[in-house]
Amino acid sequence: MKILVINGPNLNLLGEREPGIYGNDTLESLCGEISQRAAELGFECDFFQSNHEGAIIDTLHAARLEYDGIIINAGAYTHYSYAIRDAIAAIHIPVIEVHISNVHTREEFRHHSVISPVCTGVIAGLGKKSYLCALEYFR
Ligand code: DQA
């Protein structure tokens, strides 16, 4: 099982970005924990982060030929990127949408995800465990 974890805009600043909402872990330490769990499960796991919509779309396209599944935190693109939604719809591997925070308890614009309808599942509000739970799906 080969999994790609994609993190979108501003997630490179985890640890210093709004720690009351997103916690104190850096992206590096988060990816380290995911890697560790993936290894325990016998999975190969790669990581990609970008603040750029097109780079995320290119990565989704390329991933369709190389990975068995994707875990994506599209950051704020979640709420309005029809282009990322279409890229997910275009590829035929399972994509799990994750969020660190519970988007439904936050500002109204975060309550709607344009990517959820084309994702296999959605996990939000469990902090870093959102990613770890998504990994379990692929067992
Ligand atoms: C987020 C929630 C989004 O609304 C926000 O724009 C993010 C992070 C989360 O992981 O909780 O950048 O996806």
Image (spheres, rainbow, N blue to C red):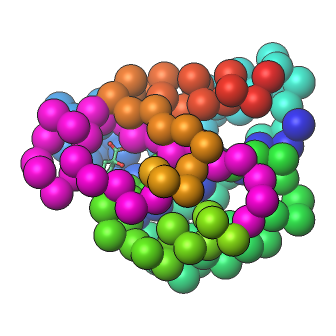
Asked if 139 appears above or below 120 in the picture, the reply is: above
Report the quarter where the N terminus lies: top right
Residue located farthest toward the front when viewing the structure as drawn: 117
State the residue at coordinates (67%, 78%). Answer: 58
Asked if 69 appears above or below 66 in the picture, the reply is: above
Quarter of the rendering containing residue 45: top right
- State the extent of the magenta-drawn residues as a range: 91-115
The reply to whether residue 36 is visible in this rendering is no
State the residue at coordinates (56%, 73%). Answer: 86
Quarter of the rendering containing residue 66: bottom right
Asked if 137 appears above or below 99 in the picture, the reply is: above
Q: Quick check: is 27 in the magenta stretch?
A: no
Q: Is residue 42 left or right of residue 47?
A: right
Q: Quick check: is 105 in the magenta stretch?
A: yes
The reply to whether residue 52 is visible in this rendering is yes
Residue 2 in the image: x percent, y percent? 85, 43
Residue 25 in the image: x percent, y percent? 40, 32
